[in-house]
Image (cartoon, rainbow, N blue to C red):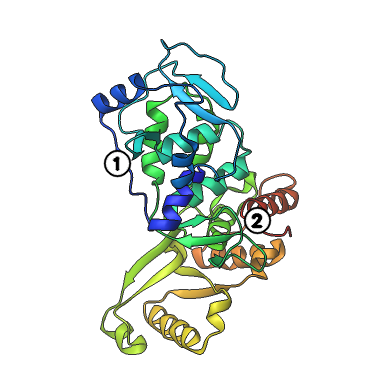
């Protein structure tokens, strides 16, 4: 996962090539285990570990290979054939799991909320960084993130889960995958998606038809009102003709405010209401519930939280998502 984040932040996408069945078998057959066979400098150069990092290196070998114990090397044998396309070549000497496979492996040790946050990151157009730096931040003091291409899609993950029914972590991955949305552009948008999209029973508000960063083309009236040919909606809800828009600190800029005003005018011309959310909204369960009630009213539905202890579950979900992205709890 460190290598995936390193590549996405450095290049803006994953430049690694997927292996076909033959090349994947050949790569596994050539796997060597031993301190002299592991080039930590090369691993560090591609972001898989730090230059002074002496943590364990995990190596996958064919199930027929001898699993020799080595200090600093954790050897895992493949108990089943991994379908082709789920390994990537990061360099001529480094073969790594594809994001879908890496996510499933991570799910073995993650809670539901942490797995959800990781899935939204990998399916989103942003990547977290390992430590605070000069990149964009979700809020003051939080780890930075970088906008980039998505590493995987919710549909691609679902297909990988079907192909790996017995892998460790697949049960949690399956539980999470049905709640993932593509195209979150920042940690705050991922939190927004998790809170509103998840069902009531899991602490969310049960709005299932949400589409993140959805493009809406404008007709003549909307173009005349806004001066824009189209808009990208942060979280569009077709059944309510409503879009939730997260306004970060950069929206305080006069040009950003003007853009938001023009965007709102164009959407109103189409009968779509824009509901702005900010950092304070995403710190308050009560504020989020008030927004959810507005959405249900616009859908023509009665807002009813049928889950027991719903307030507690919402707080746990919000705090879990915020913690997963390095933010302070509610």
Residue found 53% across the figure and 85% down from its top: 253
N-terminal label among 2 and 1 = 1
Name the one closer to the observer, 169 or 60.
60
Quadrant housing the C terminus? bottom right
> Which residue lies most toward the front here?
36
Name the one closer to the observer, 158 or 209.
158
Q: Position of residue 320 (x, y in %)?
A: 67, 50
Rendered view: 229 above or below 4? below
Q: Residue 25 vs residue 52: left or right?
A: left
Name the one closer to the observer, 130 or 220.
130
**Which quadrant of the view contains residue 325?**
bottom right
Rendered view: 95 above or below 264? above
Q: Position of residue 87 (x, y in %)?
A: 36, 33
Q: What residue did someone put label 2 on?
A: 326
| Label 1 crowd (10 A; few <14 / some 14-19 / many >=20) | some
Q: What residue did someone put label 1 on?
A: 17
| Label 2 crowd (10 A; few <14 / some 14-19 / many >=20) | some
Q: Secondary structure at mark 2?
A: loop
């Amino acid at each position: 996962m460190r290598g995936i984040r390193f590549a996405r932040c450095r290049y803006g996408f994953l430049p690694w090539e997927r292996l076909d069945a033959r090349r994947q078998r050949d790569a596994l057959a050539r796997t060597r285990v031993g301190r002299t066979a592991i080039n930590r400098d090369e691993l560090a150069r591609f972001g898989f570990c730090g230059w002074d990092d002496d943590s364990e290196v995990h190596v996958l070998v064919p199930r027929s290979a001898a699993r020799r114990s080595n200090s600093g090397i954790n050897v895992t044998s493949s108990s089943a054939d991994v379908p082709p396309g789920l390994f990537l070549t990061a360099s001529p000497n480094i073969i790594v799991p594809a994001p879908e496979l890496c996510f499933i492996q991570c799910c073995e040790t993650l809670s539901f909320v942490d797995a959800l946050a990781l899935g939204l990151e990998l399916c989103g157009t942003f990547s977290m960084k390992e430590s605070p730096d000069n990149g964009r931040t979700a809020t003051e003091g939080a780890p930075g993130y970088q906008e980039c291409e998505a590493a995987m899609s919710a549909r691609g993950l679902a297909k990988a889960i079907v192909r790996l029914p017995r892998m460790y972590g697949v049960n949690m991955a399956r539980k999470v995958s049905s709640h993932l949305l593509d195209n979150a552009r920042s940690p705050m948008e991922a939190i927004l998606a998790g809170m509103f999209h998840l069902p009531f029973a899991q602490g969310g508000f049960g709005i299932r038809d949400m589409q993140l960063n959805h493009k809406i083309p404008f007709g003549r009236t909307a173009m005349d009102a806004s001066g824009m040919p189209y808009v990208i909606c942060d979280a569009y809800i077709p059944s309510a003709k409503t879009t939730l828009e997260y306004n970060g600190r950069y929206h305080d800029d006069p040009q950003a405010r003007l853009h938001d005003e023009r965007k709102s005018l164009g959407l109103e011309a189409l009968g779509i209401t824009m509901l702005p959310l900010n950092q304070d909204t995403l710190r308050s369960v009560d504020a989020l519930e008030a927004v959810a009630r507005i959405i249900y009213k616009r859908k023509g539905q009665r807002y009813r939280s049928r889950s027991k202890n719903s307030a507690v579950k919402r707080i746990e979900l919000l705090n879990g998502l915020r913690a997963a992205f390095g933010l302070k709890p509610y």
